[in-house]
Image (tube, rainbow, N blue to C red):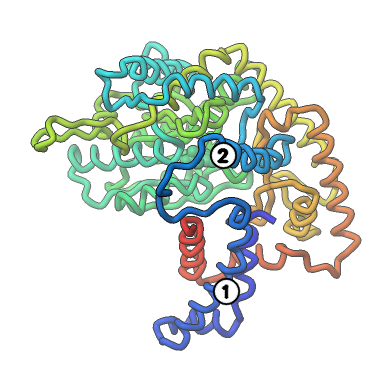
Amino acid sequence: MGLKDFLIKQLGRISPRLLASAERGLEAIPAVNQRIEKEYDEMMTELESSVKPYKDKFTSLTRIPEVGRDRAEILSEMEAMRAHEEAQWKDGFVSGAVYHGDAQHIDFLNQVYAINSQSNPLHADVWPSITKFEAEIVAMTASMLGGAGQEVCGTVSSGGTESVLLAMKAYRDRAREQKGITKPEMIVPVTAHAAFDKASQYFNIKTIHIPIDANFRADVDAARRAITPNTIVIVGSAPSFPHGAIDPIAELSEIAREHGIGFHTDACLGGFVLPWAEKLGFPVPSFDFRLRGVTSISADTHKYGYAAKGTSVILYRSRELLHYQYYTATDWPGGLYFSPTFAGSRPGALSAACWAALTSIGAQGYLNATKKILETAEAIKNGIRQIPELHILGDPLFVVAFASDSLDIYKVLDYMTRKKWSLNGLHKPSCVHLCITLRHTQPGVAERFIEDLKEAVTYVKGHPEEKGTMAPVYGMAATLPLRGLVSDMLKRYLDLIFKT
Ligand SMILES: Cc1ncc(COP(=O)(O)O)c(C=O)c1O
């Protein structure tokens, strides 16, 4: 059982009476509060062994050791952990997570990292190599996303979330300075990544959610109706994380353009798949800078760009907008200071590895990888279509979400988990998804997935009396009115992660 699953399961343990008390706002009463605290403690104690599997196997340190440890011993401990963890993702049982994963590719990136491990692009004078790599990563990504020959510019960031946060901050600051907007609003489809909600919380931008249509794509009319004088940006995904649906970016970005507001395409997931898919002749709706209304795009090199984890690219149509992302300090006693993204010092080695991934794979390599992934996705989609009890949500390319009208899909997920699969259980609506990567293109993986899925459906149909491990609580996690309670529990979980 995945950790997230376990957490949700734990929610199901809280007694209905206690939940009812909390729902009526009684958690401020000391007795109720104490009971809730006790429940949390019990949950976290139970969770601890899964979060901390190495607790009893390796030395646990809470102080810097007096005498430094033996390097060989450190390496051997780490090797043991790597071997244990690699077994989970290497054979293609995991949705998303590791997008390439071939040993030779990993070894090459590791060599590049080793060469550049001391570098920090904050000191551009000391490491001009890294600024060269980063400038070229941005240029290559821009030209791949329809920005060739245009003013398109941008920066390298640490990941999809940072790229999204940077863009939303840039829109906010521009709107404040140029239009005097002090209560900014962004129009975001409900299926857009949680990073947008994070931006909303961090930067005080009000999110106006718009619904999705029957094909799981953002509702264009709703976007049009949602515009107010405070709107700073409209967002669309290419594709969305939950259902792999590509929002109607052409229509949405045109509405934004007509109103003189920004449009952000979140291509974190699809930025390094869709351009190649289009070249291969797959039906890819427009989503990039070839659309006049698209003013920024996030695209993750650390997903389908096959770089090591820790890089993404944020691009803008105009340098003027990019300047609202930058930070400069002119009066600090530390001297003139400036940085392009949220971090100060940054790992230049990751940018070097990213550049090395892009340039060693090359357009031909990306085309081949995309072809393999999309062919595997076709095989998996066809397999799912042959299971009468299941249906695919929308018309996805490579993130395939499926649901059932006759069975509890979470019971199917339970069974798949028992068969070693690590799939994503989603809610609103209840479904499960598989994000297909190069790991799944290995011989036999797609077939194994479909066989196991068929077996899961047969089993669930044949055992209606079984409640399942996760099934009863998944539904509850989605519908529980107490989102504050759910949120509190997630915070306790984060505390647990940092416990030694
Ligand atoms: C569509 C989309 N946007 C943004 C993100 C956030 O990316 P990261 O996890 O690299 O911060 C993801 C991650 O899966 C995503 O799928």
Pick the residue in front: 92 or 283: 92
Residue pictured at 79% horizontal, 34% vertical: 446
Q: Residue furthest right?
A: 462
Q: Crowding near pointer 2: few (<14 within 10 Å), some, many (20+)?
A: few
Q: Is residue 343 left or right of residue 143?
A: left
The reply to whether residue 482 is visible in this rendering is yes
Where residue 216 sits: x, y (%)?
60, 45
Quick check: is the Cβ at mark 2 less than 8 Å away from ligand 1? no
Q: Is residue 113 left or right of residue 454?
A: left
State the image quarter where residue 349 is shown.
top left
As drawn, 461 above or below 297: below
Choose mark 1 or mark 2, whichever is in front: 2
Identify the residue under disc 2: 73
The kind of residue on which mark 2 rests is Glu
Pick the residue in front: 440 or 154: 440
Where residue 368 sits: x, y (%)?
67, 17
Q: Can you say which quadrant of the picture contains the N terminus? A: bottom right
Residue pictured at 11% horizontal, 33% vertical: 330
- Secondary element at tag 2: helix
The reply to whether residue 145 is visible in this rendering is no
Identify the residue under disc 1: 42
Pick the residue in front: 255 or 364: 364
Where residue 388 sits: x, y (%)?
85, 48
State the image quarter where residue 108 is shown.
top right
The kind of residue on which mark 1 rests is Glu
Residue pictured at 63% horizontal, 53% vertical: 57
